[in-house]
Image (spheres, rainbow, N blue to C red):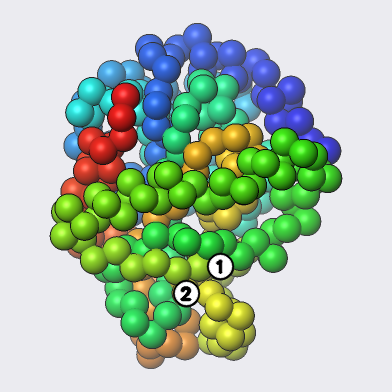
Amino acid sequence: MIDISKIYSILLSEVKREAPFTPKLGIVLGSGLGDFAKSLQIIKTIDTEKLSDYPKSTVEGHSGKIHFAKYSDLPILLFQGRVHFYEGYKIEECLLPIEIVKSLNCKYLLLTNAAGGINPFFSPGDLMLNKSFNSIFIKKEITKVIGAASSTTKENFKKFPSEELNQIIKKSALEEKVDLKEGTYFFTSGPSYETPSEIKMISKVGGDAVGMSTVHEAIYAAYRGINVSAISCITNLAAGISDTKLSHEEVTQTAEKVKNKFERLIKRIIATIEY
Ligand code: HPA
């Protein structure tokens, strides 16, 4: 079993030393959603390039900044971008932000991502609450970190994904009149988009949206006892569902169009969480 907190003890103490407060909510901003940071009151920013051994994202739009911010008085920790397994990073590097959230005693974690829509009722621009996750293509890596289930892990997983946070998200969507879809997020390893045949298979086993992140982060967060939920921005129809060729530009363009809706929802979620 890999103990991430031991590997990164120096880096974690660097972050703790820099932290101006104990955040209540951590947010990981996915592809095209990084701009959200600008709409909050930033108290302090850590440039991860200055932290020992922090993995650097190679994907456009993932700036690798960690912000301590406030909105509606709630102290928040924001990760502007993430690293992916397909970038060649080890699982413990991909999970480092989650370990930072844990080391700062953050109670809630909201993961966001860009995803391809598979469910025929989804359109680009929709937001989907991740009601369930399929980790089958990354399970082996997750097991390396979590190991055999102990009684604590079993207890933590009963609360996965966080029903408490999901309820807050759904209530916030209703109040903001955001049509929030629900479904299963299916992990694929990338780096290239899926083939139409792969999407057909994923559809048959119940995947509503597909993406290359989040699942291992969510499972690891639950294992560490954090209340975790995730929201996908459906940026495109998955391969083979529409005739257009998928591209990272389409992903970022749709995310840009959804920005206002996404910001309203996240701000309402923040305002609903009790400090
Ligand atoms: N597949 C995988 N990851 C993605 C997609 C997709 O269609 N869209 C955005 N991220």
The part of the image, by quadrant, that contains residue 129 is bottom left
Looking at the rendered image, the quarter that the C terminus falls into is top left
At mark 2, the secondary structure is loop
Identify residue type, mark 2. Asp
The image's mark for residue 208 is 2
Q: Is residue 193 visible?
A: yes
The label on residue 186 is 1
Mark 1: secondary structure: strand
Residues packed near mark 2 inside 10 Å, few (<14), some (14 to 19) or many (20 plus): many
Marks 1 and 2 sit apart, C-alpha to C-alpha, by 7 Å
Q: Quadrant of residue 188?
A: bottom right
Q: Is the CB–ligand 1 distance for label 2 below 8 Å?
A: no
Q: In this view, does 170 lie to the left or right of 216?
A: left
- Residue at 54% over, 82% down: 203
Q: How crowded is mark 1: few (under 14 residues within 10 Å), some or many (20 or more)?
A: many
**Which residue is nearer to you in this view: 64 or 127?**
127
Q: In this view, does 225 lie above or below 215?
A: above
88 or 199: nearer the viewer: 199
- Residue 156, given in percent of the width and then of the height, sits at 64, 41
Residue at 24%, 50% in the rendered image: 172
Q: Position of residue 14 (x, y in %)?
A: 55, 14
Residue 242 is situated, as x and y percent measured from the top left of the image, at 38, 88
Residue 93 relative to residue 209: left or right: right
Q: In screen coordinates, is 100 left or right of 3?
A: left
